[in-house]
Amino acid sequence: MAKPKIRSELRFLLNGEDVALADVAPDATLLDFLRLSRSLRGTKEGCAEGDCGACTVLVGRLSGGKLVYESVNACIRFLGSLDGTHVVTVEHLRGESGQLHPVQQAMVDFHGSQCGFCTPGFVMSLYALWMKSPDPSNAEIEKALQGNLCRCTGYEAIVRAAHAISSYGKAAKDPLAVERKAVTARLEQLRDGLRVEIGAGRQRLIVPADVADFARLLEAEPAATVVAGSTDVGLWVTKHMRDISPVIFIGGLDGLKTISEDKDAGDGKIISIGAGVTYTEAFAALAKRIPAFGPLFDRIGGEQVRNMGTIGGNIANGSPIGDTPPPLIALGAMLTLRKGKARRTIPLEDFFIAYGRQDRQPGEFVEAVHVPVPDEGTHFAVHKVTKRRDEDITAVLGAFHLTLAQDGTVADVCIAYGGMAATPKRAYAVEKALIGQPWTEATVMAAMDRYAEDFAPLTDMRASAEYRAMAARNLLLRFHAETSGTRAPLTVTREKAA
Ligand SMILES: Cc1cc2nc3c(=O)[nH]c(=O)nc-3n(C[C@H](O)[C@H](O)[C@H](O)COP(=O)(O)OP(=O)(O)OC[C@H]3O[C@@H](n4cnc5c(N)ncnc54)[C@H](O)[C@@H]3O)c2cc1C
Ligand code: FES
Ligand code: FES
């Protein structure tokens, strides 16, 4: 096999400057680079775990030949993932004669800042929104700011500023819009198709040339850490001080970023999503075809996390509280795993073996997930229960996929939960109690007694075991109410749930 050509420096654009780095640690974060190496201290460090948005910057990347700018969290973004991108920090907003940018001027005039620590992060999130949607609705503004926390100003003033930005300038005349062609050409030049490899031995940082190169690399070095969006792995470094080297960065591989729909697959349509597709991109495709996904997606992380994190990572990490596995299992999704050139496709459900154990061989990686679009006339819903509505980790999540027969009995039902066991898990006993029965409240109430056979949930800081058991049962009741046009009765008591 021919030896791949290797480049031994990372190359990207930072504001208006070309950057080439030959000495980069595998776990070096963008935030440290900006603040410590480049003295760009407008980007702040608050939580260092992707929650507060103080470190928000924009990353521009080519997606299908188009330049897309997205807000990301610099604190959990590794430098190695930035090859071939354009990083934009708040300093880049300074006008030629030092004047404030329209987003900044609106924040000043509408009193959107007090202590100011969060302000650069808010400015960058609003900047990303303004470029996408110059006249945003309240809902768009709230969504864009889910990942930004302000302790002192209060959000009302910031929302008013967000509405006013376009009265200070036109998004189409913004430097990032005007320079789009030139930056696109520059990023195209940076994509030379070479593998990037920096460092030696364990202390290596690798950006594979393509998916085949990644497959070869991981097969040869199965203990390497694979990093896609780094919304999990970033915290291993910033919070747990773990040594993650050597690291293989796959977030920029086009071959893992494909979304396709097979309209002739067996008896239904299947949407295939590459493991490197971000939440933002995957959600746009999935929610269009399966609208019940929409409300869930808006409650996963904040915009910055959704712009980085992938469904592939959400599956591969094997977390019992990952939000996408239960609904994907309820829909009967399949998973393609690849090792070298060999591929196998298994039901997603079978991937999760036990806590911290998945059906993944050394050197194997998640390549794609295949999601059947539910047939018309079937019912599908997913409900997430958390302590606060936005940007919170799941206590319990239930996903329900129901097919009713002509006579109103349950022809088929698939129910999967997160937060109820050591892995995402089906409620087999409950399903069994429902199949063949009339889809009535009485059937559902009787089936609820079977939950104890399926789950023995834990108590932790998010919820008690008793709460989880009760919430899981009530979600089924809610699903029945939604699908039968009745109101959910308030009859499920703490005693019954225990
Ligand atoms: C602030 C914040 C909020 C969050 N909110 C939510 C939430 O609401 N719901 C939720 O479910 N999650 C949430 N998360 C967790 C996280 O976003 C998800 O688990 C995410 O999907 C992980 O994807 P990633 O691409 O960032 O993975 P990474 O961090 O890059 O990797 C995660 C794990 O998967 C492995 N991996 C990644 N891709 C592959 C692959 N293709 N093949 C094999 N292994 C691979 C990595 O080696 C690592 O073990 C949140 C995280 C943060 C920081
Ligand atoms: S510092 Fe809080 S999200 Fe990065
Ligand atoms: S202005 Fe102080 S945290 Fe937002």
Image (cartoon, grey):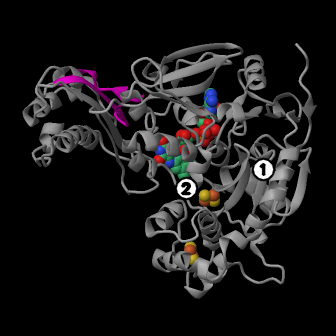
Q: Up-down: is 448 above or below 147?
A: above
Q: Residue at x 72, y 37 (%)?
A: 243
In the picture of the structure, the residue carrying the numbered disc 2 is 303
- Label placed on residue 85: 1
Observer able to see residue 155: yes
Nearest the camera: 380 or 199? 380
Q: Residue at x 85, y 62 (%)?
A: 38
Picture coordinates of residue 301, whole percent (x, y): 50, 51
- Label placed on residue 222: none
Q: Up-down: is 225 above or below 78?
A: above
**Amino acid, disc 1:** Thr
Q: Is mark 2 within 8 Å of ligand 1?
A: no
Q: Which residues are magenta?
A: 410-429
| Outermost residue, bottom side | 109
* Crowd band around label 2 with a 10 angstrom C-alpha radius: few (<14), some (14–19), many (20+): many
Q: Which part of the image, by quadrant, shows the N terminus? A: top right
| Label whose residue precedes the other's in the sequence (1 or 2) | 1
Determine the CA span between mark 1 and mark 2. 19 Å
> Under tag 1, what secondary structure?
loop
Picture coordinates of residue 91, whole percent (x, y): 77, 71
Q: Dividing the image into four quarters, tell me where ligand 2 lies.
A: bottom right
Picture coordinates of residue 166, whole percent (x, y): 60, 77
